[in-house]
Image: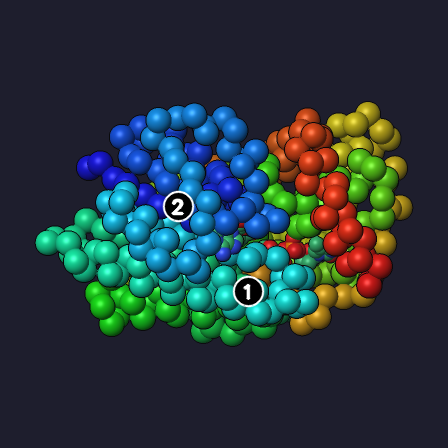
Amino acid sequence: MQQSIIITGGAGFIGSHVVRLFVNKYPDYKIINVDKLTYAGNLANLKDIEDKPNYKFVKADICDFDTIYKLMQDEHVTGVIHLAAESHVDRSIKDPFTFARTNVLGTLSMLQAAKLYWEALPEKYEGKRFYHISTDEVYGALEIEHPEILFTEQTKYNPHSPYSASKAGSDHFVRAFHDTYGMPTIVTNCSNNYGPYQFPEKLIPLFINNIRHRKPLPVYGKGENVRDWLYVEDHARAIDIIFHKGKVAETYNIGGFNEWKNIDIIKVVIKTVDRLLGRKEGEDLDLITFVTDRAGHDMRYAIDSRKLQRELGWEPSLQFEEGIEKTVRWYLDNQAWLDNITSGEYEKYYESMYANR
Ligand code: NAD
Ligand code: DAU
């Protein structure tokens, strides 16, 4: 079937991989990337596909209901893959209102626009889909002492940061639109992604860039927190499978069964950067600088993605060693992309965040 799909947040990290995958894989679909281009949105992430005939970019704020509703009508939208969000936990601690506005009200605006547009059609919700991309952080934190316990789709929501609280709020609205209006919704909760085009305020690209420039590596607390890392293209593949084959009203957890203590992953990144730059492997380990912990820092995230593997046949394609090598190489080969972002406003922001630790 021909589809006309709005992908929100397509100029961001994960969104750009999803847009690229859909534009290349489905030449008969119309892919409309709706993005406000906040500090995190960057059209340079999509240079390779921007001229494709099945791709269109629309600069818009998801909170702008009138614009989104009109776009749904004009483009005869059949599906929404909703990724646009404020995504950085540290920023949410400083500015929670922006997170509530974009993540909660913005999601509500997308839902309401889709509802009004689809309910007015003769076929109503038939053949339609609203797919909301969420995070494992809504489940709260796990204990290091109980490695056998993972987040499942049944785990109760227990968010701790303004970011995760706002994502939890948006997830509840999506499910409420299914239960109240019958909208065909799906929610997925994914673990930490890594790979090309990630904004360099996040751990892995920030540290790669700092190692290259021999700047300090600010490790929060003792570096003992655990995250479950998934290569971003594996997340994009999961989104493709779930959008097409996932069951309406279901939740799917997405993760790589790939838990790492921050300090251990940081050592791997340092050694990989050193090796690829022709430095002595490990010579930059002394850049590690322990700084004040993140407020409310969740100790451990770990996703049980067996439901997705069992029911839809998805599994991660890359071993972590291969993924991290590819990732480090990409950032080292794309210094101009990093330099464009790290000069100017962002540099001032980073210096002030670092100084406050
Ligand atoms: P990102 O910060 O890199 O990109 C977010 C994008 O949304 C940017 O292009 C930005 O311009 C756009 N945006 C922000 N506010 C907007 C608004 N009001 N209107 C329109 N566009 C707006 O984020 P990401 O890391 O790619 O995350 C994408 C989604 O995936 C988010 O919903 C996030 O919660 C979720 N997620 C991320 C991860 C991860 O590890 N990065 C893991 C699980 C889930
Ligand atoms: O779990 C999924 C989530 O992963 C997504 O929902 C978020 O959008 C995404 O940003 C990410 O959140 P984290 O807070 O886990 O990612 P971040 O890269 O900010 O931090 C990863 C870990 O590294 C975390 O324990 C904090 C620590 N850290 C981070 C930075 C930026 C440091 O020690 N030093 C740092 O400078």
Residue 144, image x, y percentages:
64, 66
Looking at the image, residue 163 sits to the left or right of residue 273; the answer is left
Relative depth, front residue between 212 and 59: 59
Quarter of the image where one finds residue 92: bottom right
Compared with 72, 214 (above or below) is above
| Quarter that holds the C terminus | bottom right
Marking on residue 7 = 2
Residue 79, image x, y percentages:
29, 48
- Image point 78% across, 51% down: which residue? 348
Mark-to-mark CA distance, 2 and 1: 19 Å
Relative depth, front residue between 354 and 109: 109
**SS state under label 1:** helix
Residue 102, image x, y percentages:
50, 62
Q: Amino acid at mark 1?
A: Phe
Marking on residue 99 = 1
Kindly check if marks 2 and 1 are in contact, taking CB atoms under 8 A apart as contact. no
- Image point 52% across, 29% down: which residue? 47
Quarter of the image where one finds residue 30: top left
- Image point 64% across, 67% down: which residue? 95
Q: Amino acid at mark 2?
A: Ile
Image-quarter location of ligand 2: bottom right
